[in-house]
Image (cartoon, helix red, strand yellow):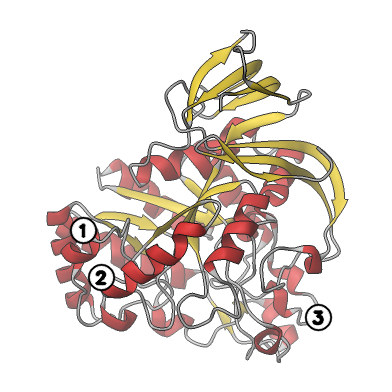
């Protein structure tokens, strides 16, 4: 079926423009953009001046299959993503067992086929994500892995990591690292400082991130590997990132939406829904990172969706699991940056759609003729009160519970097929 989206506010992250226009979707792709009439027989959807943008590509989503399906299944994650305007999920390999063999990867790929959105998978860089022996990178690439990472399990064996990076370079594979010095950050719950001391919580210096990033950059320079830092959250890391790019290293960096919109004081009186890895930073760091996204120094914004059950969150702060669900709160949280004047809508979708597509060599992420029709229609100004129990994710651990937010997803399309429609549209 041909779909005609009329009277839309088109967000183009390549041209960095916002224009009023119409879009024709045919055979799963954007067939035409501009002031045209509806093709004969097309399904016409009046966008009523709301925003139409490329669907979000979210790198670093935790899904519980295999091993923790009670926290999040591939199906529930797909439904949550569709409701949040995330049309491509890039899932992490920190499952039980880890996705470190072609057989496990094939299992989750088959399980993901019924999801309403595209689900791609990263594979573990080392066996068991233990940082010692590299996985069968070539076989995993052939099986469909889009990148390799050990996630929060930062290797303490630089020689083993260098060997894996060298082999990944020969395959053209992307390595995704977590820039933290593992010994300094072990057991830490918050960023060190006066607030951590007053609360009696175990803290880690922001320099642990810089030290970890510097080590990884040395290995990238030595091996020539393609590298993406999953989260850069401190101002002191930014000069090192700028130098790495200026020196011609194939390096990009990301940051989670929580580190862009929250700071260390949001922990308040030991609120475990605000516990993250890395921990929330000082307001000065947050503002510096927002500016780095605006300038393009930080390339990608992600949700770092990490479901956790009630039993793992209803614990003393130092003992509670880190992370929060974010697939459905991703876009409303992004709108905080838009309404505050920090980022424009094209800048936001450059970081959460276009740049992730470029880094992973995907066709999606563009508002252009011929591109896949993975699109999100949303109202950036629609207010609502977030109720965590209304989320489609199996787990409900969101820091935004009870928060007044702006920005509602109205419709989501994947390959031209409508996979979500809000009840109010």
Q: Residue at label 2? A: 102
Report if residue 285 is visible in the image: no
* Residue at x 35%, y 73% (from the top left corner): 150
Looking at the picture, tell me which residue is in the foreground, 202 or 198.
Answer: 202
Q: Residues within 10 Å of mark 1 (few under 14, many from 20)?
A: few
- Looking at the image, the residue that sits furthest to the top is 36
Residue 254 in the image: state x and y as whole percent.
Answer: 47, 53
Q: Residues within 10 Å of mark 2 (few under 14, many from 20)?
A: many
Against 415, is 116 above or below?
A: below
Residue depth check, mark 2 versus mark 3: number of the one nearer the observer = 2
**Dots 2, 1 in contact, CB < 8 A:** yes
Residue assigned mark 1 = 142
Nearer the observer: mark 1 or 3; the answer is 1
Q: How far apart are labels 2 and 3 at the CA level?
A: 44 Å
Q: Which residue is mark 3?
A: 269
Closer to us: 1 or 60: 1
Q: Quadrant of residue 377?
A: top right
How far, Cα to Cα, is label 1 from label 3?
48 Å
Q: Residue 195 sits in which quadrant?
A: bottom right
Q: Quadrant of the C terminus?
A: top right
- Tell whether label 3 touches label 1 (CB within 8 Å): no
Above or below — where is 409 with respect to 70?
A: above
Check disc 1 and report its element: helix, strand or loop.
helix
Residue 91 percent across, percent down from the top left:
45, 63
**153 or 111, which lies in front?**
111
């Amino acid at each position: 079926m041909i779909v005609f989206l009329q009277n839309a506010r088109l967000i183009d992250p390549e041209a960095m423009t916002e224009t009023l226009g119409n879009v024709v979707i045919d055979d799963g792709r954007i067939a035409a953009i501009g002031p045209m009439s509806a093709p004969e027989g097309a399904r016409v959807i009046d966008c009523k001046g709301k925003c139409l943008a490329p669907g979000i590509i979210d790198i670093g989503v935790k899904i519980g299959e295999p091993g923790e399906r009670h926290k999040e299944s591939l199906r529930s994650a797909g439904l949550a993503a569709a409701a949040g305007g995330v049309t491509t999920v890039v899932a992490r390999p920190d499952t039980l067992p880890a996705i470190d063999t072609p057989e496990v990867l094939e299992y989750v790929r088959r399980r993901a086929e019924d999801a309403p959105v595209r689900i791609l998978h990263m594979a573990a860089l080392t066996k068991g994500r233990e940082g010692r022996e590299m996985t069968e990178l070539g076989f995993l690439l052939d099986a469909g892995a889009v990148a390799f990472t050990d996630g929060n399990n930062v290797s303490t064996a630089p020689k083993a990591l260098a060997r894996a990076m060298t082999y990944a370079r020969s395959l053209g594979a992307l390595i995704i690292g977590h820039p933290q010095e593992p010994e300094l950050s072990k057991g830490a719950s918050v960023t060190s400082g006066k607030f951590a001391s007053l609360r009696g919580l175990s803290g880690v210096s922001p320099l642990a991130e810089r030290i970890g990033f510097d080590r990884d950059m040395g290995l990238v320079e030595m091996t020539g590997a393609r590298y993406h830092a999953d989260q850069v959250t401190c101002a002191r890391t930014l000069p090192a990132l700028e130098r790495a790019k200026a020196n011609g290293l194939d390096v990009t960096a990301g940051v989670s939406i929580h580190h862009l919109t929250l700071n260390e004081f949001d922990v308040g009186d030991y609120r475990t829904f605000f516990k993250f890895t890395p921990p929330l930073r000082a307001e000065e760091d947050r503002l510096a990172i927002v500016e780095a996204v605006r300038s393009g120094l930080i390339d990608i914004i992600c949700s770092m969706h990490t479901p956790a059950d009630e039993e793992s969150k209803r614990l003393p702060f130092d003992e509670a699991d880190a992370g929060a669900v974010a697939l459905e709160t991703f876009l409303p949280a992004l709108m905080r940056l838009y309404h505050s004047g920090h980022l424009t809508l094209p800048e936001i979708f450059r970081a959460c759609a276009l740049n992730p597509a470029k880094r992973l060599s995907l066709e999606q992420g563009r508002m252009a003729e011929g591109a896949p029709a993975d699109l999100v229609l949303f109202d950036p100004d629609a207010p609502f009160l977030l109720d965590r129990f209304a989320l489609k994710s199996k787990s409900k651990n969101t820091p935004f519970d009870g928060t007044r937010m702006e920005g509602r997803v109205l419709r989501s399309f994947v390959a031209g097929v409508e996979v979500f429609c809000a009840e109010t549209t």
